[in-house]
Image (spheres, rainbow, N blue to C red):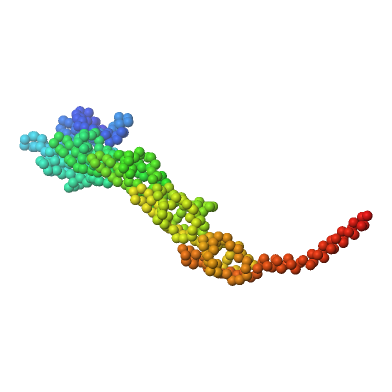
């Protein structure tokens, strides 16, 4: 019964209390924190109310009572889910009966209303400021900075360059490059001077927001193949000409991309487009790679501006002379790349250390046959030993030895002569047999 009575008395005191709202701050579209003081007949306490903005209902109310007069005087963000309340504590002087300062307490809460940390200051600050999730307390020209963990720090850590976007939390007012803003959320590349101010308070710093340049394409270690597209904020120039965001870049070579932002910000990016190089050997069409060896004539095609074959201009003519080749592909802004390949001599119709009655051989390139230079199609039917030497750049590349063991043409002539007498007798037999058959019919 006594407990019920005590609760009733406390309820009456709350009802009689005078709630004075100091301010409220929004954490999100659905959450709002209100703070202030409760004037009671015998005491002053601080209070917090955490509202669900979607319904307007109070999710939690907190009354802070340290046993003295507790006045909530300032609110600051410490993170997206925590905040700090500055509470000035007073006591009644027993002699004068006047309210006197006792200490200042920093109270860290989370958005559920749980008290996470406290820090007691013996002296009363002259002013309070909050930015970069830090609390700034002024003491007659001097400043104490508390970070998000309520630890004292010497300065505020701000990443001032190599950023692709920059957001900054603050209470009070702000200017960006001299222009007043409502929020600091920068995504456009540039050099920015930031000023946080409130009455006589000023805090300056400079940041560089880098261009968040996205290059879409097939990337390899040497560069890109095919077409690429570029996406970025800022004014973009490609090889000194205005570039339309998202348009195709397919010019082979070292493409120079320049992005211009605020306050003379400039960022240069090299985009190397690799050449597409194909060869055609009359049957196959494939990508030409370094150190390929061919045994037939080829043509080479590419999408570059200029091509040089062994230092001479080349326009996809048929390459039909065996040799060692260097082909150079030239693109924009002094881009050059070389591919080396060989066209090797070859022979068809004869093999090394084989015997033949006769051969019809085809030499791709040039060769010596028993010391006589030949090329193209050749018929060999004379009996004997043969040495075929394939030439590559006037030097012997490969040697093939073969033999003709019998002259097939002479053999056919001899066979034809040996059958002649027998053909005469065979003709007479056909005549006699035919005559008999005719007489019998008669």
Lateral position of residue 124 relative to residue 60, left or right:
left
Count of all numbered marks drawn on residues in the image: 0
Percent x, y of residue 308: 41, 53
Front residue of this view, candidates 347 and 153: 347
Up-down: is 223 above or below 375? above
Front residue of this view, candidates 177 and 55: 177
Lateral position of residue 276 relative to residue 19, left or right:
right
Lateral position of residue 436 relative to residue 393, left or right:
right
Front residue of this view, candidates 4 and 345: 345
Up-down: is 175 above or below 345? above
**Residue under the point 17% across and 44% down:** 145
Using the rendered image of the protein, determine whether residue 224 is visible from the camera's viewpoint: no
Percent x, y of residue 280: 50, 52
Using the rendered image of the protein, determine whether residue 198 is visible from the camera's viewpoint: yes
Percent x, y of residue 183: 25, 35
| Quadrant of the drawing holding the N terminus | top left
Residue farthest to the left? 95
Lateral position of residue 377 relative to residue 40, left or right:
right
**Residue under the point 31% across and 42% down:** 240
Percent x, y of residue 321: 49, 58
**Residue under the point 17% across and 31% down:** 39
- Where residue 165 sits, quadrant-wise, is top left
- Where residue 360 sits, quadrant-wise, is bottom right
Front residue of this view, candidates 112 and 177: 177
**Residue under the point 32% across and 39% down:** 242
| Quadrant of the drawing holding the C terminus | bottom right
């Amino acid at each position: 019964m006594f407990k019920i009575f005590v609760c009733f008395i406390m309820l009456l005191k709350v009802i009689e209390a005078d709630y004075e709202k100091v301010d409220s701050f929004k954490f999100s579209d659905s959450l709002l924190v209100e703070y202030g003081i409760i004037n009671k007949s015998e005491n002053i306490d601080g209070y917090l109310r955490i509202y669900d903005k979607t319904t307007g209902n109070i999710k939690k109310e907190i009354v802070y009572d340290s046993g003295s007069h507790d006045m909530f005087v300032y609110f600051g963000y410490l993170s997206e889910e925590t905040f700090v309340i500055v509470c000035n504590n007073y006591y009644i002087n027993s002699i004068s009966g006047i309210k006197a300062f006792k200490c200042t307490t920093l109270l860290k809460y989370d958005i559920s209303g749980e008290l996470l940390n406290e820090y007691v200051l013996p002296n009363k600050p002259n002013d309070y400021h909050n930015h970069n999730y830090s609390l700034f307390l002024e003491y007659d020209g001097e400043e104490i900075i508390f970070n998000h963990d309520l630890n004292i720090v010497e300065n505020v850590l701000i990443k001032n360059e190599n950023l692709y976007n920059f957001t900054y939390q603050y209470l009070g007012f702000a200017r960006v490059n001299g222009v007043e803003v409502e929020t600091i959320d920068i995504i456009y590349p540039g050099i920015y001077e930031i000023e946080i101010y409130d009455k006589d308070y000023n805090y300056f710093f400079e940041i560089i927001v880098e261009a968040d340049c996205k290059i879409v394409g097939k990337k390899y270690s040497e560069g890109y193949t095919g077409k690429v597209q570029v996406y970025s904020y800022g004014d973009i120039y490609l090889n000194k000409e205005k570039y339309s965001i998202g348009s195709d870049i397919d010019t082979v070579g070292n493409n120079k991309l320049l992005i211009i932002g605020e306050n003379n910000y400039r960022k240069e990016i090299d985009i190397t487009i690799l050449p597409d190089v194909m060869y055609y050997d009359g049957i196959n069409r494939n990508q030409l790679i370094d150190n390929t060896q061919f045994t037939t004539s080829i043509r080479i095609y590419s999408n570059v501006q200029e091509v040089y074959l062994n230092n001479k201009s080349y326009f996809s003519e048929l390459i039909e002379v065996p040799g060692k080749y260097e082909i150079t592909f030239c693109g924009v802004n002094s881009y050059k790349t070389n591919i080396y390949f060989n066209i090797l001599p070859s022979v068809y119709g004869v093999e090394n250390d084989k015997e033949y009655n006769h051969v019809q051989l085809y030499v791709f390139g040039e060769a010596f046959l028993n010391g006589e230079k030949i090329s193209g199609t050749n018929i060999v039917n004379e009996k004997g030993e043969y040495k075929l030497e394939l030439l590559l750049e006037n030097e012997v590349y490969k040697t093939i030895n073969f033999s003709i063991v019998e002259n097939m043409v002479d053999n056919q002539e001899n066979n034809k002569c040996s059958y002649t007498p027998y053909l005469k007798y065979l003709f007479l037999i056909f005549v006699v047999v035919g005559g008999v058959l005719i007489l019998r019919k008669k």
